[in-house]
Image: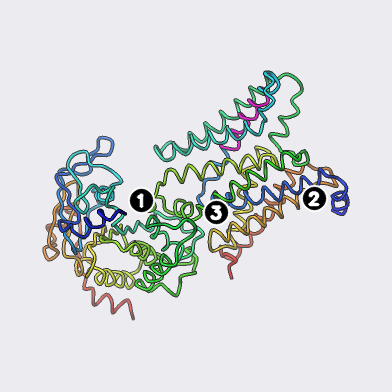
Amino acid sequence: MSKRAAMNETRYSGPVVELKHVSFAYQGTPVLDDVSLIVDHRDFLSVVGPNGGGKTTILKLILGLIKPAKGTVRLFGASPENTRHRIGYMPQYASLDPLFPVSVLDVVLMGRLGQGMSLWGYSRSDRRCAEEALEKVEMAPLRDRPFFQLSGGQFQRVLLARALVSNPDLLLLDEPTSNVDVAIETGLYELLHRLNEQLTIILVTHDLGFVSRYVNKVACVNRRLLTHPTCEITGEMISAIYGSHVHMIRHDAKERDRISHD
Amino acid sequence: MTEFIGDLARFPFLQYALLAGFLVSIACGIMGSYVVARRISYIAGAIAHSVLGGMGAARYGEVVFGLSWFHPLLGAIAAALISALVIGLVSLRAREREDTVIGAVWAIGMAVGILFIFKTPGYNENLMSYLFGNILMVSREDLWLTAGLNLLILVTGLVFYRQFLAVCFDEEFVLLRGLKVQAYYLLLLSLIAFTVVLLVSVVGIIMVIALLTLPAATASYFSRRLWHMMGLSVIFSILFTSGGLALSYAPGLPAGATIIIFAGIVYLLVAAVSSALGGRRFIA
């Protein structure tokens, strides 16, 4: 990275993500319609909505993997292709091959690719950063464990470490709690809560109620997008997004913790 | 077996065959591991079969137009590279019809080869050795060519190990880290194409996929990391090629088919034992 680019990164103080009147369609079927969204520094945003509602599309727009048909997407005030290296991305668990022959450390080191790479192998500082990231997610003792011997929760933690190892300014997580049980889910959210002291976090999930203790903004996406502060999640809002046939259950996270630890 | 060992000291063609098996095993173990881990053995299959088109065209040019420089191996390399790039570009650009294109490359390559061979005057003894391989016909020049290609594959495959590993595991993530994923993927497919050409001389076009994937698939039961898998599959590959060659010698069986059957039996045994133990892997 050039010196000037690095200076611009430190000087920029606008919104981390900005979508303005964005529309997108897959082969004629509209997925997003006039969507606007602002994510500020140190926000913890949860993007929720039904399957096919456009959650993944928003994520891909922010990552610059697709371009909007109408409107603009800005990431750190610039086009996403130029700034997406500042994102730590954690893909869905199911998108990876669980039989792939890699160790935990191998996976985390992938997050160091593209950062002043040496010609041959990973550098000592790459390895140190990877060790630190593994310690943050409490996976350091399992660094040599092959990927296919991990549980769902350990798998997620490794992917989170890989996202963290590039020292990102924005953490983007796609369904991080699929495939894990409630106790691990709580642990993961508490970890994210701690990371949120320095990082902006965007989390895509279909799991509404549980997130609300930690996030400060919720974006509900179903072709259109509504943003709310978390305290406003109501039954009406949920049925507006998901349709009327939804049963709302009140979760008391503390109580669930206790039950799962018994 | 004893007959094979006895004759090995006397006949250079046997020494060449054994050496060829050793050499191709290095490329085969490294690139085969990428193929198995990334699950693209059908792409390797299409590249292998399209090689017949290149070999047939080269042989035709040699006989009809007297292009003596146009060695069938050159034709094979050209055909393999073209197929690899066509399939690679299609799979990167338009994913949904990838399998159709692979099938088309596979069959068109063979059809072109058959037409050229049919139109080449004289007795076509070559067709059988293209299809089923003939490790006992390997010459001194072939060995040099094999060694050169091998070196190219070995060096490139190891220098870009980090990138290839990451691209195979999670293409999207690597793209987001700012690497040229398309270039790396096409380079990987080109190296696979070179490896396929090397293996054609040993087991022939039809059985290349087996020799490329069986050692790596067997090794995968004992490996926790990709480079472990590579090292082990080189060893398995040497075992299969030299073992198959030795077993085929005394009864006068075709070496290529014997190598494949040997490799197949070992793989199936390992897979069966693993699944009998509840799908476990044999890792310390």
Query: Dot 3: few (<14), some (14–19), or many (≥20) neighbours within 10 Å?
Result: some
Q: Which chain letter goes with mark 1?
A: B
Q: How many marks?
A: 3
Gap in angstroms between the C-alphas marked 3 and 1: 21 Å
Residue visible at 25% across and 72% down? A194
Query: Dot 1: few (<14), some (14–19), or many (≥20) neighbours within 10 Å?
Result: some
The amino acid sitting under disc 2 is Leu
Residue visible at 64% across and 55% down? B234
- Local secondary structure at mark 1: loop
Instruction: For residue A56, say whether it is visible.
Output: no
Is A83 positioned to the left or the right of B282 in the image? left
Residue labelled with disc 3:
B158
State yes or no: residue A14 in magenta. Answer: no
Residue visible at 49% across and 57% down? A120
Q: Quadrant of the N terminus of chain A?
A: bottom left
Q: Give whichever of B137, A179 is nearer the camera.
A: B137
Colour pattern: rainbow
Residue labelled with disc 1:
B178
Q: Position of residue B23 (x, y in %)?
A: 69, 49
Q: Which chain letter goes with mark 2?
A: B
Q: Main secondary structure of the magenta part?
A: helix
Q: Give whichever of discs 2 and 1 has the lower sequence position.
A: 1
- Local secondary structure at mark 2: helix
The amino acid sitting under disc 3 is Leu
Q: Give whichever of discs 3 and 2 has the lower sequence position.
A: 3
| Vertical comparison of A209 with A50: above or below | below
Residue labelled with disc 2:
B247
